[in-house]
Image: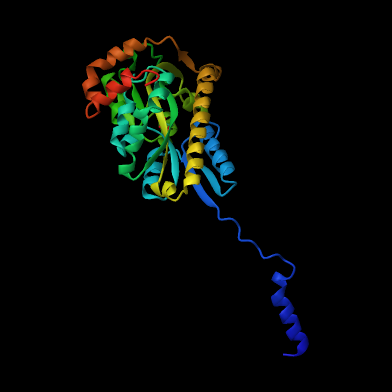
Amino acid sequence: MNLTRRLALAALLAAPFAGAPFATPALAQTQITIQHPLPLNSHYGAGATAFKESLERATNGRYRVTIQRNDNEREAIESVQIGTLDCNITSTGPVGNFVPDVRNVDVPFLFRDYAHARGVLDSQIGQELLAKFNARGLVGVVWLENGFRHLTNSRREVNTPADVRGLKVRTMENQVHMRAFTTLGALPTPMAFSELVPALQQGTVDGQENPIPVIVANNLNQVQRYLTLTGHVYSPALLICNPGVISRLSAADRTAFMEAAKAAQKANRDRVSADEASGVDELRRRGMTVVTNVDNAAFQQALRPGASQIESGLDSALLGRIRNWQPGQ
Ligand code: EAX
């Protein structure tokens, strides 16, 4: 090889470093993916977004959070459990199939109002329930909120428990809820949220039950005509993660992670409160017939004959603690 060619080759080999400062290795970045079943513009999306912004800011971008929609909560929990998904936000509906103790918070009319529900879940009682996830290959990171569930259907106005009789009602895959609707004389049909709208469109079911934020965010008014504000169940939600996500955190990053979880809880609950304040009027505006002055005591009375069945296998002492909980406890 002649001198010219050797000099050209040497110049070529030196070029990448010539004048270029030694490229500092890009700071290692950890990806965390969170799935949830609703539109980003929803009470779950608000929580996920707050988590993302808080953690990315607190770690100067060393953590990057990706938010995805997956409207099959049970499948998402399974993915978190086997480790193919980092975290998900879900209502407690399907969670009792993974962490049986969680079924205790799904009992109809267990929580008096939002203050009672939030107070209990933020108390020692809530922490004890979160600790139950560890033995099941999951981490219950923080309690979030879905809201008080109300009944919708497209067959008739529901004013009293007797009006529920004979309705085919989609429920979550939750034994406690299914037993409650059976007690009311309905025909409970459990299915994942991902199957709900097609089932309503095809008439496979007449109705469903969900909190106002879910009904509004998913435009269920397009497939349901009547809304009855039964408030029959308070539906908690959760941020659940794979244990590996948590165990890989340094002490400092774990603090940032938990602060992000609290930010998610605040944003989520604030959005539920906002949707509760405006959602019923919005659904009326969209054309739903809304029954507001519901005799909740009549629905509680109608469920009493089934109470032992509904609460079968649950923790009666825990249910008593929840019912008797007062602020400051
Ligand atoms: O968590 O499945 C349901 O009805 C849930 O309320 C919904 O997925 C939000």
Q: How is the image coloured?
A: rainbow
Residue at 54% across, 32% down: 46
Residue closest to the eye, 128 or 238: 128
Q: In which quarter of the image is residue 105?
A: top left
Q: Where is residue 329 drawn, in percent x and y?
A: 36, 21
Quarter that holds the N terminus? bottom right
Residue at 36% across, 35% down: 130
Q: Where is residue 256 drawn, in percent x and y?
A: 51, 41
Q: Where is residue 127 drawn, in percent x and y?
A: 36, 32
Q: Work out whether residue 100 can be spotted.
A: yes
Q: In which quarter of the image is residue 286?
A: top right
Residue closest to the eye, 64 or 230: 64
Q: Where is residue 324 drawn, in percent x and y?
A: 31, 18
**Ligand 1 visible in quadrant:** top left
Q: Work out whether residue 216 can be spotted.
A: no
Direction from residue 108 to residue 268 in the image, left or right: right
Q: Is residue 24 above or below residue 71?
A: below
Q: Is residue 84 above or below residue 21?
A: above
